[in-house]
Amino acid sequence: MDYDVVVAGGGPVGLMLACELRLGGARVAVLERRTEMDPTIKGGAITTPGAEALYRRGMLPALAEVQRQAMDRFRAFIRERNGGDGGGAAGQGLGFVGHFAGIMLRADLVDRTEPGFGDAGPAAEISLVAQQDIERLLGGRADELGVDVRRGVELTGFDADDEAVTVRTSDGAIRAGWLVGCDGGRSTVRKLAGFEFPGTDPEITCHQAVVEMTGAENLKVGWTATDTGVYAHGPMPGRIVTVELDGPPADRDAPVTTEDLQARLRRVSGVDVTITEVRTATRFTDHARQVTDYRKGRVLLAGDAAHVHSAFGSQGLSLGIGDAMNLGWKLAAVIGGRAPEGLLDTYTSERHPVGAWVLDWTRSQVAAMRPDPQSRALREIVSDLAGTAVGTTYLTARLNGAGVRYELPGGHRLTGRSAPDLELADGRRLADHLHGGRALLLDLTDDPELRALAAGYAGRVDTLTAGCPSRPELAAVLVRPDGFTAWAADAGAPTPTAGLAEALEEWFGAPEGR
């Protein structure tokens, strides 16, 4: 084999997957047809699950710095809107935590004591990080880990059998054990492999752009619904979004022109703006589809190659990173002989429901954006709910990815959920011990029996004995490499180790010497 895995697509999902595979010891090549990063405006934010994943791999300081710079630009935009006075910022953007169908959600109404808040540690403070920044950071990490990223090389075809995949490219042929398509919504890998891709057809036309314009002082900041659609202005200077609900574009691939953008923004906003320059622009729809299975033999899919949906809610980037985190350690374990191939079946069973949920939440937002009387009545009800603490807390938590739970064996309340970022007695946090991409058994009661059970998993499961004064009810937590809880026990349980041996073998194979 030339490589253990070929990853088609060098965007954030492909690079994240490649990094995870390298941490697991796999030899990886990434094929990216572009020679440089695509500068077209894309996702401008990340939800907590995506931030958690990057945090657990030691990237929090870099993310925080990118967000600081973005917030500086945001504040400058608000000051400009307020004539140099930033005092009204809280009412014009900084006091909001996102939107549902263009209905702005107020930060002061979110009850962060509710389940789904407060467990992610510092990652919960990260959101305003653009897709290009994440791609740049992951590109640097891939270089550090020794991933072979081949830019300017396009996958043109492949042949897969029971033993390997021969990948044909614009630069020759590569033979690898596995192929993963991370090549976007129009995935070549998905099409050539024949994955079923059911879903719903597009009904709307959206444009996002960064422009220079005059007359913008009459545009409202944030999201605004009108009789002709929905538009957004900000949070960065010149950033606009238009949503028109009268059908899909006649030609999805037609160039986005200055004249077309200006006409659409005037039509939706009712404001006589003049666009003088387009810096970057893109067109998208509410096309929503998902493959029925994320794997066909030795070919797998992740990110937009496996599921497409509208950008409302900024959930797509984190969804794809979650796919990469879930798949990476499993595929690396199979390649390294540390787990049976059947472990890969859990990739679809765990990630497909999460993707289906995101598709439905984006569809529901389109329903609440339509201008017909029935949809506007629905929008009024959702707006009323969003004006309450309970409603805003629910919408914010769900849009931010809280509540994801895999159906794993075991009855503990943490099992199957993203592990809480516990603050340990020495001042470090749980995420600080996950940078290497291995599983972790956290022993919080200094129990030698726990450690004895994990002794047969050296090199697969790290063991740490530590105190956690803030969570005295916990005795131990087994955290998978992707940060999800595989097993947990409470202090004072009659048999603190009950189920641990089974969980270790379920996820990490038989112990050494057996």
Image: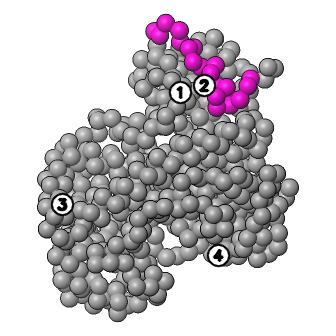
Dot 4: element: loop
Mark 2 or 1, closer to the camera: 1
Instruction: Residue at 61%, 38% (x, y): give it.
Output: 481
Q: Is residue 144 left or right of residue 43?
A: right
- Report, in whole angstroms, how far the alpha carbon at label 4 lies from the one at label 2: 42 Å
User: Looking at the image, which residue sits at the far right?
Assistant: 1
- Numbered circle sitting on residue 34: 4
Could you say where residue 231 lies in the image, as x and y percent from the top left? 26, 73
User: Quick one: label 2 or label 3, which is nearer the N terminus?
Assistant: 3
Identify the image quadrant of residue 124: top left
Q: Nearer the viewer, residue 86 or 108?
A: 108
Could you say where residue 361 lies in the image, as x and y percent from the top left? 35, 55
Residue bearing mark 2: 503
- Numbered circle sitting on residue 409: 1
Residue bearing mark 3: 379
**Does residue 118 belong to the magenta stretch?**
no
Mark 4 or 3, closer to the camera: 3
Cβ atoms under marks 2 and 3 closer than 8 Å: no
- Report, in whole angstroms, how far the alpha carbon at label 4 lies from the one at label 3: 41 Å
User: Quick one: label 4 or label 3, which is nearer the N terminus?
Assistant: 4
Amino acid type, residue under disc 1 in the picture? Pro
Instruction: Residue at 42%, 78% (x, y): give it.
Output: 283
Q: Quadrant of the C terminus?
A: top right
Residue 144 in view, yes or no: no
Q: Residues within 10 Å of mark 2 (few under 14, many from 20)?
A: some
The magenta region covers 492-511
